[in-house]
């Protein structure tokens, strides 16, 4: 096989695109397509979050807050401020990026569990704003979202959104892989291994942490906007801390520091509850047991640990 | 003044529960470096087991004791079956395992018990007590008193008994503790059992006030974690002070600002404290060995 095909940037992207086409062709009905779109939307957030957690080594338990802000930007801006639905996600992304930039420095000074707490608190504050400012947001019941129109054509329906989500996911993976392979990416990895060593080697630690934080927040906002436009409705739970924790679980389950692993994690954790519903009241027990078992036996995440096992088998 | 006192009593009662949950976090964190997000599930198990044991015919005090024992066994099982096999894994991975455990325990409670809200009768009646114009229910006194007793017993245990000291030694340096002959495995088991027992006690004491259900643990774990972080992770005094502060902040926020934003007040305070004191109120100043 030619070497360039084995590179994550070319081979990995091609594989991902091929899987996307296969899933579309093989999906027996709209329910599967809907699950696939949900996976794609979560995967966009996870790709950014994995850069922050897996590469920069900074945990965030508040990214659902950014997702929620993006979602409500798509809902509130057209409804109350006359912004066209196509521009709203962009305005949302820029505002979330600005917000993330403003809070990044004080928050990223914190380490480990304290950082987890601060990001958790930030996410919860966003959630409370969205829940309680009901004149703007419709409160806990949520609000309807104006449909997207491109050249007068109303963009709704699963086929359209599968295409858009797939394209955006490929784009964000491509951007992220490029970022990882740039001097920024190397600085982030140095930071992950040892902040002090990176600092001694001349890496502007604070600056690179901020870059990863803002980048991941903007991707979360984009995915949030897309999810609002796709479903035509937003509720505050999407910004809730349960969703934040789910996003982190996707990163860790799939593999911290592995972009494609994170996507796999998003696929597993998004689809698992859908298919576990056949077990009715045993659903949560089984989900919890699977989560524990995977993390105990594939502790580096599904993709990296499996690749390790395969490599070990090949070399004997 | 009366209203302030009223809010203060409310805050101290909730705060005492948060303090107990935060103490549970602290004990397990010190012994094993694990942040156990299933801590709230111990509180839920304490309340739910007591409710169902007494429905199945046990008198209330016996049901409570049985519930504490049941929760401790679950704590021990959590350590044996989920934490120990993953020893050496990344801290975040261990946290995800405890989240998995908490989803599992919630699901288990849903199957073994049910999805309804349940209450316990107040331990010594519902006749409110008048204190300087504000009222205090006897059950609030039970909660605050229970938390106080737990704090005193823990203090005695950790500073005056050999076994307690061996837990402290393990938390400072596991290898050194092993070298002086401390059985680290037993210490870990004891920490999980103790932490679960404290959580279960909190659940039993508070159920007459707040009711309980299979999913009651999630919010409590969140608040207890917040309290432990506010106080400084790993410091028992910090856990208690953090718990009371979070409880009081919530009660004052709900009373003077708006009940919708009561949680926001607590989290805003925590964020502000962390910006000024990055290791919480009583946390060890972080020095990193390179």
Image (cartoon, rainbow, N blue to C red):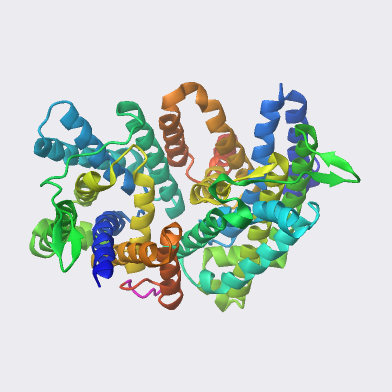
* In the image: residue A303, left or right of residue A292: right
Give the quadrant of the N terminus of chain B: bottom left
What residue is drawn where x is 38% and y is 50%?
B219
Say whether residue B286 is magenta: yes
* Vertical comparison of A7 with B239: above or below: above
Give the quadrant of the C terminus of chain B: bottom left
> Where residue B87 sits in the image (x, y, percent)?
36, 48
Near-viewer residue (B61 or A223): B61
* Vertical comparison of A57 with B288: above or below: above
What residue is drawn where x is 69% and y is 37%?
A37
Near-viewer residue (A254 or A39): A39
Say whether residue A256 is magenta: no
> Where residue B202 sits in the image (x, y, percent)?
22, 50
* In the image: residue A121, left or right of residue B229: right
* In the image: residue A178, left or right of residue B1: right
Magenta stretch in the rendered image? B283-290
Q: Give the dominant element type of the magenta stretch: helix, strand or loop.
A: loop
Q: Is residue B196 visible?
A: no
């Amino acid at each position: 096989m030619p070497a360039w095909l084995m590179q994550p940037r070319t081979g990995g992207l091609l594989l991902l695109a091929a899987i996307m086409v296969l899933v579309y062709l093989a999906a027996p009905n709209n329910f599967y397509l809907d699950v696939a779109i949900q996976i794609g939307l979560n995967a966009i957030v996870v790709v950014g979050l994995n850069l922050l957690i897996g590469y920069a080594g900074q945990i965030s338990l508040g990214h659902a807050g950014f997702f929620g802000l993006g979602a409500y930007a798509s809902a509130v801006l057209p409804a109350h401020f006359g912004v066209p639905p196509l521009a709203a996600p962009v305005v949302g992304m820029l505002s979330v990026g600005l917000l993330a930039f403003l809070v990044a420095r004080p928050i990223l000074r914190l380490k480990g569990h304290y950082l987890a707490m601060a990001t958790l608190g930030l996410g919860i504050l966003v959630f409370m704003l969205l829940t309680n400012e009901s004149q703007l947001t419709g409160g806990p019941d949520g609000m309807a979202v104006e449909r997207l129109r491109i050249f007068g054509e109303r963009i709704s329906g699963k086929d359209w959104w599968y295409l858009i989500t797939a394209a955006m996911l490929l784009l964000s993976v491509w951007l992220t892989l490029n970022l990882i392979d740039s001097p920024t990416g190397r600085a982030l990895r140095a930071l992950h291994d040892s902040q002090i060593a990176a600092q001694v080697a001349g890496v502007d630690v604070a600056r690179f942490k901020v870059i990863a934080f803002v980048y991941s927040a903007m991707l979360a906002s984009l995915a949030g906007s897309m999810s609002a436009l796709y479903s035509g409705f937003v509720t505050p739970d999407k910004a809730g801390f349960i969703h934040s924790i789910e996003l982190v679980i996707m990163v860790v389950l799939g593999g911290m520091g592995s972009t494609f692993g994170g996507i796999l994690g998003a696929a597993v954790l998004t689809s698992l509850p859908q298919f576990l519903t056949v077990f009715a009241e045993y659903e949560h027990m089984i989900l919890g047991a699977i989560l524990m078992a995977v993390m105990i036996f594939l502790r580096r995440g599904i993709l990296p640990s499996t690749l390790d096992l395969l490599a070990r088998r090949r070399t004997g | 003044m009366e209203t302030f006192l009223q809010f203060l009593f409310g805050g101290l009662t909730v705060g005492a529960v948060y303090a107990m949950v935060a103490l549970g976090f602290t004990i397990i964190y010190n012994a094993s470096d694990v942040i156990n997000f299933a801590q709230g599930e111990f509180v839920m198990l304490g309340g739910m087991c007591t409710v169902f044991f007494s429905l199945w015919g046990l008198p209330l005090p016996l049901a409570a004791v049985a519930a504490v024992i049941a929760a401790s066994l679950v704590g021990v099982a959590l350590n044996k079956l989920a934490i120990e096999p993953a020893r050496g894994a990344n801290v975040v991975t261990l946290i995800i395992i405890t989240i998995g455990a908490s989803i599992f325990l919630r699901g288990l409670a849903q199957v073994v018990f049910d999805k309804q809200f349940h209450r316990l009768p107040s331990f010594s009646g519902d006749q409110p007590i008048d204190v300087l114009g504000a009222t205090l229910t006897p059950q609030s006194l039970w909660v605050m008193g229970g938390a106080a007793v737990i704090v005193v017993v823990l203090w005695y245990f950790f500073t005056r008994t050999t076994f307690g000291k061996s837990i402290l030694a393990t938390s400072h340096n596991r290898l050194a503790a092993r070298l002086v002959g401390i059985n680290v495995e037993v210490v870990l088991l004891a920490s999980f059992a103790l932490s679960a027992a404290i959580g279960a006690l909190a659940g039993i004491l508070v159920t007459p006030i707040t009711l309980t259900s299979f999913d009651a643990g999630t919010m409590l774990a969140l608040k207890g974690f917040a309290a432990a972080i506010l106080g400084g992770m790993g410091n028992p005094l910090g856990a208690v002070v953090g718990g009371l502060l979070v409880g009081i902040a919530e009660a004052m926020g709900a009373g003077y600002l708006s009940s919708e934003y009561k949680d926001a007040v607590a989290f805003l305070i925590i964020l502000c404290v962390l910006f000024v004191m990055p290791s919480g109120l009583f946390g060890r100043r972080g020095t990193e060995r390179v």
